[in-house]
Image (tube, rainbow, N blue to C red):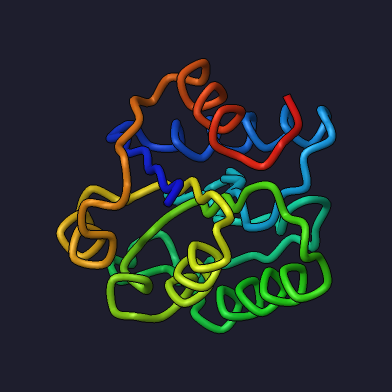
């Protein structure tokens, strides 16, 4: 099983790393599925808007609820996330020859058995490599899901890219 994850504390760094890796691999001809996150700053807003782009070339879903600057609750728009999941599932059904699945985050929704969790499991069963971002708060749930099947990669674009090249179904 080819399964790797990356965890980063710095806000937005992991999103940029995974998006850059995906862009580079697509430019090299990789057939990717999954999502990468784009954080869009909004003037006057304390929090950025969370957008996910379905790989390889869209659509883009805004998965943020606009709760106001003073809000402290979860900003995830579950309905929009599930639309992104359905879009990725459609991509996987239409394309049997995917080289790699990238999912921006194994987050709270996945920790509770929803979101991309089933997609990740089904892709691994198809022997397609998977690269995930993992929210540190959800690491225990991720470890319960993955067991010892996943390898942790450092937040280093060269190391992540090398793992993708060595473990994906991409031609050498």
Could you tell whether 138 is left or right of 23 in the image?
A: left
Residue at coordinates 49% horizontally, 27% vertically from top-left? Answer: 160
Report x, y in % for residue 42.
60, 48
Report x, y in % for residue 119.
53, 72
Q: Relative to 13, say whether 114 is above or below.
A: below
Q: Relative to 162, say whether 47 is above or below.
A: below
Residue at coordinates 78% horizontally, 47% vertically from top-left? Answer: 31
Nearer the observer, 168 or 11: 168
Report x, y in % for residue 132.
45, 49
Report x, y in % for residue 108.
31, 68
- Which quadrant holds the C terminus? top right
Nearer the observer, 73 or 71: 73
Residue at coordinates 62% horizontally, 55% vertically from top-left? Answer: 35
Nearer the observer, 52 or 129: 129
Q: Work out which residue is located at the far left of the displayed protein and give it.
A: 140
Q: Quadrant of residue 52?
A: bottom right
Q: Relative to 64, say whether 152 is above or below.
A: above
Nearer the observer, 72 or 18: 18
Residue at coordinates 46% horizontally, 19% vertically from top-left? Answer: 159
Label total for image: 0
Could you tell whether 84 is left or right of 158 in the image?
A: right
């Amino acid at each position: 099983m080819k399964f790797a994850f990356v965890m980063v504390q710095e806000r937005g760094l992991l999103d940029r790393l995974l998006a850059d890796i995906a862009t580079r691999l697509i430019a090299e001809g990789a057939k990717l599925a999954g999502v990468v996150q784009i954080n869009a700053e909004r003037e006057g807003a304390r929090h950025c808007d969370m957008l996910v782009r379905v790989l390889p070339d869209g659509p883009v879903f805004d998965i943020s609820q606009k709760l106001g600057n003073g809000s402290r609750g979860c900003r995830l728009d579950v309905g929009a996330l599930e639309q992104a999941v359905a879009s990725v599932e459609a991509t996987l059904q239409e394309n049997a020859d995917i080289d790699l699945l990238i999912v921006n985050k194994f987050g709270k929704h996945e920790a509770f058995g929803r979101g991309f969790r089933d997609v990740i499991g089904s892709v691994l069963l198809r022997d397609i490599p998977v690269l995930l971002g993992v929210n540190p708060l959800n690491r225990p749930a991720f470890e319960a899901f993955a067991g010892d099947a996943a390898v942790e990669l450092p937040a280093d674009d060269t190391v992540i890219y090398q793992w993708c090249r060595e473990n994906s179904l991409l031609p050498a």
